Image (cartoon, rainbow, N blue to C red):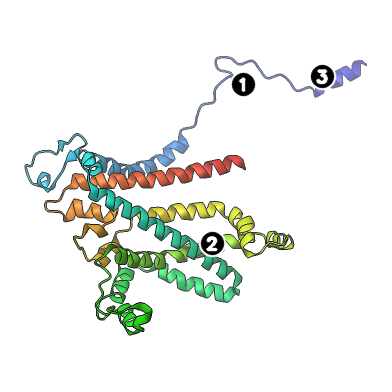
């Protein structure tokens, strides 16, 4: 019996020493090692200079009467305007019209791009490997085309009198498409100009969506589709019950990225509109340029105020995406 008690005492681990002023007890707080923070400090400083400081400067400009006059030598400092730029925007009908155009055009561009890109991605997934790779490379060339080059090509296509689209429509029967297409100017009216703009953006954007969806489809086990087929699901039900749930995070990421990119469209509109002063064809990005640089005189404060509005819209979309990602992470 004594030997058994002895063996039990030998197997019982010793109690930890009590926590003292300098002892390593459980109640003592571990010191945080500053080395990781020191290593990332240079990167944080660079990010602050490159990203945070321009935003702070933009907000500061929007709150002051900052024009080209303040850039002259010995010019007075910009004066605080008591939110005058924002009050002017809120009471300006043109701003609300431009904001509406921006939202509508962005929704159309994002919607068509996402739907077309998804359909093309599914089609590529069902094609043979070599054909899918060939088509994907060709599409990525369109995605990699500079925005200036793509815009110039589409402007030439839709030019009056000698544009390929106008000539082709003019040669079709009048009972089918009407008449007078040869001299039609696509870049004067909002509907036609935005139609060409949406075509350019979709042509350049859908390859990235298609290739991303194709990569996501490759990661879905084929057994899930076989099980859905055994249950009698067709192509549409298989997409909603298998493909979409499995690729939901990917679709959310692509949707947010596409919204951010399309809200900031400027180069294509500038080339297509050819710097026209017709405000009915403005988007927020073009309105920023017109107020901040092209107006006479240039009003940097007003341009910054419009840029702040667009930045808030982009941050709202990003925050919504992060919220969805966090909620999905919590439910897993």
Q: Position of residue 25 (x, y in %)?
A: 61, 20
* Secondary structure at numbered mark 2: helix
Q: Which residue is mark 2?
A: 213
Q: Is residue 179 left or right of residue 214?
A: left
Cα separation between marks 3 and 1: 23 Å
Say which quadrant the C terminus sits in: top right
Can you tell which mark lies on residue 26?
1
- Is residue 124 positioned above or below 293 on the image? below
Is label 3 in contact with label 2 (beta carbons under 8 Å)?
no
Is label 3 in contact with label 1 (beta carbons under 8 Å)?
no
Callout 2: few (<14), some (14-19), or many (20+) C-alpha neighbours within 10 Å?
Answer: many
Q: Position of residue 193 (x, y in %)?
A: 29, 66
Can you tell which mark lies on residue 9?
3
* Secondary structure at numbered mark 1: loop
Examine the image and state in which quarter residue 201 appears.
Answer: bottom left
Examine the image and state in which quarter residue 29 appears.
Answer: top right
- Is residue 67 positioned above or below 133 on the image? above
Q: Earlier in the sequence, mark 1 or mark 2?
A: 1
Residue 262 visible (yes or no): no
Q: Nearer the viewer, residue 20 or 253?
A: 253
Can you tell which mark lies on residue 45?
none
Which residue corresponds to the image point at 29% horizontal and 56% vertical from the top-left? 283
Residue 282 visible (yes or no): yes
Q: Earlier in the sequence, mark 3 or mark 2?
A: 3
Q: Is residue 243 left or right of residue 232?
A: left
Q: Position of residue 268 (x, y in %)?
A: 30, 64
Examine the image and state in which quarter residue 49 appears.
Answer: top left
């Amino acid at each position: 019996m004594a030997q058994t008690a002895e063996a039990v005492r030998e197997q019982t681990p010793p109690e930890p020493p009590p926590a003292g002023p300098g002892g390593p007890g459980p109640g003592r707080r571990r010191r945080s090692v500053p080395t990781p923070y020191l290593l990332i400090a240079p990167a944080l400083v660079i990010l602050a200079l490159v990203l945070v400081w321009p935003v702070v400067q933009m907000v500061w400009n929007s709150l002051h009467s900052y024009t080209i006059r303040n850039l002259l030598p010995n010019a007075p400092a910009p004066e605080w305007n008591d939110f005058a730029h924002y009050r002017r925007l809120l009471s300006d009908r043109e701003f609300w019209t431009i904001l509406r155009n921006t939202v509508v055009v962005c929704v159309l561009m994002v919607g068509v791009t996402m739907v077309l890109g998804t359909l093309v991605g599914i089609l590529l997934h069902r094609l043979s490997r070599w054909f899918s790779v060939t088509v994907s490379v060709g599409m990525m060339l369109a995605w990699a085309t500079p925005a200036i080059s793509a815009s110039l090509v589409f402007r030439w296509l839709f030019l009056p009198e000698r544009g390929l689209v106008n000539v082709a429509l003019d040669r079709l029967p009048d009972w089918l498409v009407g008449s007078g297409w040869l001299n039609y100017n696509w870049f004067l009216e909002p509907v036609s100009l935005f139609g060409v703009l949406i075509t350019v953006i979709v042509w350049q954007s859908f390859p990235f969506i298609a290739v991303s969806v194709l990569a996501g489809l490759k990661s879905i086990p084929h057994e899930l589709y076989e099980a859905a087929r055994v249950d009698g699901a067709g192509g549409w039900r298989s997409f909603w019950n298998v493909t979409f749930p499995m690729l939901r995070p990917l679709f959310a990421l692509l949707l947010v990225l596409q919204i951010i990119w399309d809200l900031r469209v400027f180069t294509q509109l500038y080339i297509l509109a050819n710097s026209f002063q017709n405000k009915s064809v403005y988007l927020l990005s073009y309105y920023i340029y017109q107020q901040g640089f092209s107006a006479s005189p240039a009003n940097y404060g007003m341009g910054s105020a419009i840029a702040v509005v667009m930045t808030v819209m982009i941050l709202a979309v990003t925050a919504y995406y992060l919220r969805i990602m966090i909620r999905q992470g919590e439910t897993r």
